[in-house]
Image (cartoon, rainbow, N blue to C red):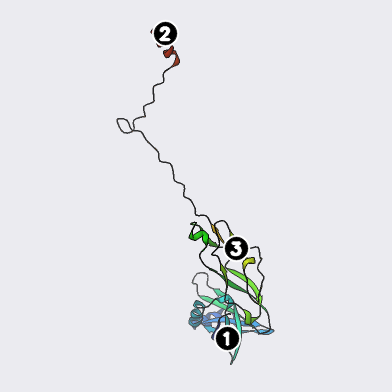
Amino acid sequence: MAQTVQLDAQIRAPCRKKGAKSVRNAGRVPAVIYGHGREPQPMSVGAVDFDRLLEKIAVESTIVEVTVGGSTVKALIREVQRHPIKQGILHVDFQEIHAGEKLRLEIPVHLVGTAEGVRNQGGILDQVLRTVEIECLPADIPERVELDVSALVIGRSLHVSDLSIPKAEILTDASLTVATVTAPRVEEVAAPVVAAVEGAEGAAVAEPEVIKKGKIDEEVTEEK
């Protein structure tokens, strides 16, 4: 089942760029919560608290119980905007969820086991796909989906069609590769250059004497 965490938020007035900067200068992150027919509600969350939260959850699949304005709602984190240089968080989007309302979300794919092709053939395991999109009710959100790669040998792959998630529909293309084992890269070794040295260093290699056919014929004639 999906992990559930708590987060306190404060209502804030809709603001422009300067107002958002003031919120950040006060050690908070501008945010908004929307969904289920409600008007988007501007709010803010503590920057330090939210950073710590992100360190211990799978963002895509964790249910966040947001307490704001005296009430608590369940939500998913839909987007975390970060500064391209400073890496600080600029804005967070939350989507309110309800028990009987199906959701579409991304969940992480976790590989388990040691592939046969790695263990006994020296291959390299490559995880091509790290998340898949699913549709399910909030109560059925899995924290992640696991895929056993133990039997995977060199040259073989596992696909989305090999995944199984109870009470959820997988929306990602079933033919996409999730993991594969490739052969180890063979480094080409240059053939050593053999240099014959005769006399002084760098002297040319002596060529074998070529005995011409005419000379052999003359020697045979003289012997007769």
Look at 68% across and 79% down and name the residue there: 102
| Residue corresponding to mark 1 | 66
Q: CA distance from mark 2 to mark 1?
A: 114 Å
Position of the N terminus, as image quadrant, is: bottom right
| Residue corresponding to mark 2 | 221
Local SS, label 1: strand
Camera-side residue of 28 and 127: 127
Camera-side residue of 133 and 159: 159
**Picture quadrant of residue 135:** bottom right
Q: Is residue 203 above or below residue 68?
A: above
Mark positioned earlier in the residue sequence (2 or 1): 1
Q: Which kind of residue does numbered mark 1 sit on?
A: Val
Horizontal side of residue 3 vs 103, given as left or right: left
Q: Residues within 10 Å of mark 2 (few under 14, many from 20)?
A: few
Q: Which kind of residue does numbered mark 3 sit on?
A: Leu
In this rendering, does residue 11 appear at all?
no
In this rendering, does residue 50 appear at all?
yes
| Residue corresponding to mark 3 | 158
Horizontal side of residue 115 vs 199, given as left or right: right
Q: Is residue 21 above or below residue 209?
A: below
**Horizontal and vertical percent position of residue 19:** 56, 82
Mark positioned earlier in the residue sequence (3 or 2): 3
**Horizontal and vertical percent position of residue 145:** 58, 72
Position of the C terminus, as image quadrant, is: top left
